[in-house]
Image: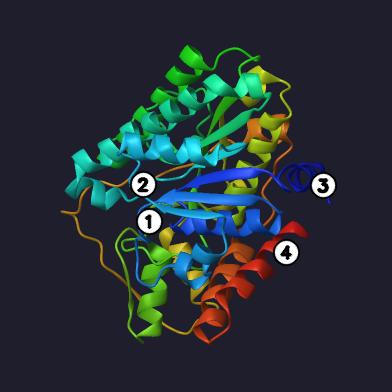
Amino acid sequence: MDEVLEMIFDCYRGRCVLVTGHTGFKGSWLCEWLLSLGAEVHGFAQEPPTEPAIFDQLGLAKRIASHTIGDIRDRGTLAKAVASVDPDFVFHLAAQPLVRLSYREPVETFDTNVMGTVNLLEAVRQQARTLDERRKTCSVVCITTDKVYENNESGQAYKESDPFGGYDPYSASKGACEIAIASYRRSFFNDPANPVWVASARAGNVIGGGDWALDRIVPDCMRALDRGETIPVRNKVSTRPWQHVLEPLSGYLALGAALATRTRFADYASGFNFGPDPSANRTVKDLVTEILRHREGQWEDRSDPKAVHEAGLLNLDITKAREVLGWTPRWDFETTIAKTVEWYAEVGAGEDAAAATRRQIRGYEHA
């Protein structure tokens, strides 16, 4: 086992962890992994966003320490939840995560992603007033996206020091979210002696079993194949940094564990990219073609010249995560697709979703 996983395994057992957005795709996988690490897991989120939902498939409502349904835009309710849980760690994943939906609901997107994050940080700031006297600390990892950067479509790999931006409301809201996180860190959590340390994490296009969202290519593929239909592909030439969901989650857990060491404040309390190896930067066409190596079916080009703008090229530079955290991706593009298709096939054939998920977690840990 490498040093990163040793740090993760040594860190979370018996510790209290709050996950916002725990009913979503990534949040559910994170809760399952934290449970396997022996953490006391608490969740705050809206109802599962899809039907089916991996949160329900894993039976997490009855397996985590507390399952609170709420909206991060409701500052009072969120503050009460944070105070009640009194967490050692916070992983903030709750968000409006869809680009195309952000065009239809721009105000809700900005409100959820920016003010929801501000509400979370303010709740932690209020809680920090009592942490010192109790000799307790709290490590906060706020999750944003690779789309926070001002994307000039040059194909360059964006570094953590590159400027934030965003064409569509989703990307812009996440760029603004990063600015808000940096502001809170500098204004209220800028002293290494402060009991609260805050970092942010930016991941690429995350795929894996149990994603049932609309307007995402992998769930679109699985739904079409299950129905015996041709897969509709709307952006076949768009390039994305595809990565299995366990890749960024391992980065988030490593970053949280690093914050908990209360060392190297300037290094750890900052922003990090968690992307795949550059060889996994492939087109949507490549992704669908690889899926069809494991499932029989066909795809067709549904490109629409009148469609809303979506980024054509995205690429993350992960040098900082490698050098500062010792983190590196484990599964290549082909393995990522194989594991993703495998999960849907096994669960679709009747296997228990929690067992299939835990098996992939163990496989990743031993990769």
Image spot of residue 153 (x, y percent): 38, 37
Instruction: Please tell me how crowded label 3 is: few (under 14), some (14-19), or many (20+) other residues with Cα within 10 Å.
Output: few
Q: Nearer the viewer, mark 3 or mark 4?
A: 4
Q: Camera-side residue: 53 or 335?
A: 53
For disc 3, the marked residue is 2
For disc 4, the marked residue is 362
Q: Secondary structure at mark 3?
A: loop
Determine contact: label 2, label 1, CB under 8 Å. yes
Three-letter amino acid code of the residue under disc 4: Arg
Q: Nearer the viewer, mark 1 or mark 4?
A: 4
Instruction: Please tell me how crowded label 4 is: few (under 14), some (14-19), or many (20+) other residues with Cα within 10 Å.
Output: few
Left or right of 122 on screen, residue 127? right
Image spot of residue 264 (x, y percent): 71, 20
Mark 1 or 4, nearer chain start: 1
Q: Nearer the viewer, mark 3 or mark 1?
A: 3
Vertical arrangement, residue 56 with respect to residue 128, above or below: below
Three-letter amino acid code of the residue under disc 1: Val
Q: Which mark is residue 237?
A: 1
Residue in the image at 65% along x and 26% along y? 268
Give the CA separation, mark 4 to mark 2: 34 Å
Q: Secondary structure at mark 2?
A: loop
